[in-house]
Amino acid sequence: MAVTINTLREYKQKGEAFSALTSYDSTFAQMVSESGVDVILIGDSLGMVLQGHDSTLPVTMEQMVYHTDCVARGNRGSLIMADMPFMSYGTIDAALDNAAELMRAGAHMVKLEGTDWMKDTITALSERAVPVCAHLGLTPQFVNKFGGYKVQGRDEQTAQKMIEHACELEAAGADIILLECVPAPLAARITQAVKAPVIGIGAGAETDGQILVVHDMLGMTTGRVPRFVKNFLAEADSVQDAIAAYAKAVGERTFPAEEHTFKA
Ligand code: KIV
Ligand code: NA
């Protein structure tokens, strides 16, 4: 049966962890969905992974629509989430038009990076039938504001702010919260504070779901391997086996382990 937002809510209620991976093309999408991964993200990470840029900022709507279309054709029942690229939701009108394009291409939900300023945008999308995932913590589109890719929410003041923002964005209509590179104790607090399912990457083992970039979990990271990445192909016989092992490890909460986690 196809995964929906309700499936993810049920996982949270039962305390069962669900898995997510990025895909950018039809072949990966089919393998990922047939391996039992619940959510497929067409991440704007494709700007780095596929295009070789040093950030996600150059990615365009046209490219996101193309890759969403490719993924949708390969998908076999996972929930498809598509990233809204840099400045494609700078105004509410732009957000509505651009989200509609991604939904027409086959997305079931869109993901936006930001904090409390996104409240009205999320409400507008949600009221017009577009489910939203709000991405907090290390939001890569903010790399130039952050001055690099750094763990977020390390001091109590910024941690408190992140909890408030997650609650406000949920109240505004966000159906999923995604936390990237935040200390595990903070991710656990946010996961308890909101009813919406919380997906983590570099956010410890206590979020409701986990996500990785598919190339990373297959050992295809170019450059420095982030702390939160595990190469599942190292102990698998095939790409399909590696993806299935990832889904199983997430479901059993054996991934992420301590060594993949930021403690504080
Ligand atoms: O673009 C992406 O791949 C992402 C995930 C890492 C969460 O946003
Ligand atoms: Na992204």
Image (cartoon, rainbow, N blue to C red):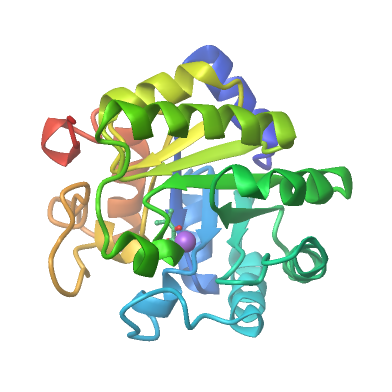
Judge left or right: residue 43 versus residue 134.
Answer: left
Q: Residue furthest right?
A: 128
| Residue 214, image x, y percentages | 35, 61
Check the image and report above or below for 184 versus 140.
Answer: above
Q: What residue appears at the point 28 percent right and 65 percent down from the top-left corner?
A: 147
Q: Residue at x 66, y 66 (%)?
A: 72
Relative horizontal placement of residue 53, taking residue 38 as reference (left or right): left
Q: Position of residue 82 (x, y in %)?
A: 61, 61
Q: Is residue 72 left or right of 136 when viewed as pictured?
A: right
- Count of number-bearing discs: 0
Location of the C terminus (image quadrant): top left
Q: Is residue 16 visible?
A: no
Whether residue 111 is situated above or below residue 174 in the rendered picture: below
Residue 57 x/y as whole percent: 46, 77
Please name the residue shown 70% across and 60% down the image.
107
- Relative to the observer, which residue lies in front, 202 or 36? 202
Q: Is residue 127 left or right of residue 103?
A: right
Residue 131 visible in the displayed image: yes
Q: Is residue 252 above or below residue 87?
A: above
Which of the 4 image quarters holds residue 205?
top left
Q: Quadrant of residue 111?
A: bottom right
Out of 12 and 126, give the one closest to the viewer: 126
In what quadrant of the picture does the N terminus appear?
Answer: top right
Q: Residue furthest front?
A: 157
Q: Residue 260: where, in percent of width, then height?
A: 17, 40
Q: Quadrant of residue 99?
A: bottom right
